[in-house]
Image (cartoon, rainbow, N blue to C red):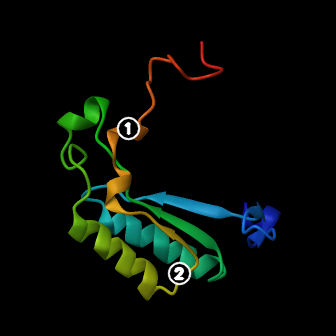
Amino acid sequence: MYRQVGLPSFDKNGLMTRGLIIRHLVLPGQLANTSHVLNWIAGNLPREVCLSLMAQYLPTYRAVYKPPLNRRLTKREYNRAVDILLNLGLEFGYVQELTAADECYVPPFDGTGVPGIF
């Protein structure tokens, strides 16, 4: 994807008009995987690549029965993920607050209220 769209370009209002944003959802108990992904990005893409480190994981459906996915991220886990990101020099992008993990953002998966889903 990076080869197709390159680094981000922004308009005069600060909106991205072209480029790649890599979104990575940090999962509870999976910091080794986050570290692996971030190391790959740092080793294979320019430092200026736009990265969104997401803290919005919520256990739903059957995940509530599967530790460690049955819980939200801890502050310590997410802070470690942010530390890994910054230590790799990946400083262009976005870091969410832990408060982003809120059930009000979870859509109804039964298709009600979602345009285009029957």
Q: Is residue 6 above or below residue 65?
A: below
Q: Is 5 positioned to the left or the right of 66 in the image?
A: right
Q: In which quarter of the image is residue 6?
A: bottom right
State the mark number for residue 90.
2
Question: Hey, which quadrant is residue 80 in on the image?
Answer: bottom left
Q: Percent from the top left, x then y, of residue 55?
A: 37, 58
Q: What residue type is labelled 2?
A: Leu
Q: Which residue is drawn at 18% across and 35% down?
A: 65
Name the element at disc 1: helix
Secondary structure under the numbered disc 2 in the rendered image: loop
Please name the residue that numbered disc 1 is placed on. 104
Where does the image place residue 104, in percent across and percent down from the top left?
37, 38
Graded by Cα atoms within 10 Å as few (under 14), some (14 to 19) or many (20 or more), the crowding at tag 1 reads few
Amino acid type of the residue tagged 1 in the rendering: Cys
Query: Picture coordinates of residue 28 (x, y %)?
Result: 27, 56
- Say which residue appears at 47% left-offset and 67% top-offset: 37
User: Residue, x 64% and y 63% (percent of image)?
Assistant: 21
Residue 54, above or below 72? below
Quarter occupied by the C terminus: top right
For the residues marked 2 and 1, what is the alpha-carbon distance in whole angstroms? 30 Å
- Give the number of callouts: 2
Query: Depth check: 46 or 112 in front?
Result: 112
